[in-house]
Image: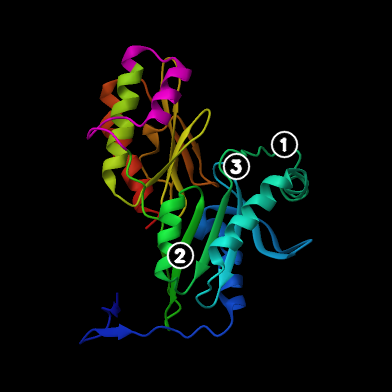
Amino acid sequence: MPLFDLNQTPVKMVKLKRVDNEQEIHKLISDNLETILGVKFLASEYPFSDGRIDTLGIDDNNSPVIIEYKKTKSSDVILQALFYKNWLVDHKADFKLLCREKLGENVQIDWSNPRVIIIAQEFNKWDKFAIQQMGGNIELKEYKLYEDNRLYLEDLVVKEEKPGKPGEIPKDIESYIKNRQPRDNVEAIFRMLIQKIEEISTDIRSIVAKTVISYRTTRNFASVQLYKTVVRVHLTFGEVPEQTGVFSKVYPNRKHCHLDVKDESKIDVALKMIRKAYEDTL
């Protein structure tokens, strides 16, 4: 899809910038990893027995992340992604040590959802088909770099259709609700919130962990936690909204806010702020 510069009359199409060296895009994204992908940087060109991993990180959900950059279409990209993912799971101690060195002793790691992200200018149709069939946390992202130094990333992972009737809550979320044991009125609020979040856009992906359900596009924008007497919504913004009075806690440096929803009167406010956090990722 072409990009147009509206600051000129007549409008002018912005040309793509030729990328001859994958290290250029590697450095660009690695230097801005948390902003672009919501991943904390741990290491670049990480050596292991069979080569080097382009980038290692940990995301907003404390899931380990491997990021690889490809300049051209590659027939072995899926096999390589599977190999890296297996290596990561088999070397938990090495990854934990790296996290402690970079982020401190108290870092928490969630091994239930390790991710591999492959970034390239283009993938072939077989790569896309394979990822759709496999599912899991192997992600393909195509990039376009423009001459005015704008970067566009497109997530090629097609959202998996969940079986069941329209509006039906997926089984993994039902299990989450059962384990959290909320009061009936709080459960009703929670169900309404997560259904409304899913309706915002088809490019939103949900990640169900033991204590929280997170929602992201290229990075996390909201996490919803269910307690017995309250639903707590964690939000990450581009800039903290001016209406700070609606939040229970505000962390300006992290651009992160908590919003507690105890009754239906706060649902509309919560949804407004969730949509704002989502739009800040676009």
Q: Looking at this view, is 253 or 24 the one in front?
A: 24
Asked if the residue under mark 2 is in contact with the one under mark 3, i.e. CB atoms within 8 Å, the reply is: no
Q: Looking at this view, is 264 or 137 the one in front?
A: 137
For disc 3, the neighbor class at 10 Å (few under 14, some 14 to 19, many from 20) is some
**Circle nearer the viewer, 1 or 2:** 2
Residue under circle 1?
106
For disc 1, the neighbor class at 10 Å (few under 14, some 14 to 19, many from 20) is few
Q: Position of residue 132 (x, y in %)?
A: 41, 54
Q: Residue at x 30, y 20 (%)?
A: 188
- The stretch of residues the image draws in magenta is 163-185
Q: Residue at x 27, y 36 (%)?
A: 196
In this orientation, does residue 155 appear? no
Q: Residue at x 54, y 46 (%)?
A: 254
Q: How is the image coloured?
A: rainbow
- Image-quadrant location for residue 172: top left
Asked if the residue under mark 1 is in contact with the one under mark 3, i.e. CB atoms within 8 Å, the reply is: no
Residue under circle 2?
127
Local secondary structure at mark 3? loop
**Residue 36 colored in magenta in the image:** no
Residue under circle 3?
62
Q: Amino acid at mark 1?
A: Asn
Asked if the residue under mark 2 is in contact with the one under mark 1, i.e. CB atoms within 8 Å, the reply is: no
- Image-quadrant location for residue 272: top left
- Counting residues from the N terminus, which is met first, the one under dot 3 or under dot 2? 3
- Mark-to-mark CA distance, 1 and 2: 38 Å
Q: Is residue 181 left or right of residue 98?
A: left
Q: Amino acid at mark 3?
A: Asn
Task: Check the picture and name the quadrant holding the N terminus.
Answer: bottom left
Local secondary structure at mark 2? helix
- In the rendered view, tell whether residue 32 sits above or below residue 85: below
Q: Looking at this view, is 27 or 87 the one in front?
A: 87
- Image-quadrant location for residue 223: top left
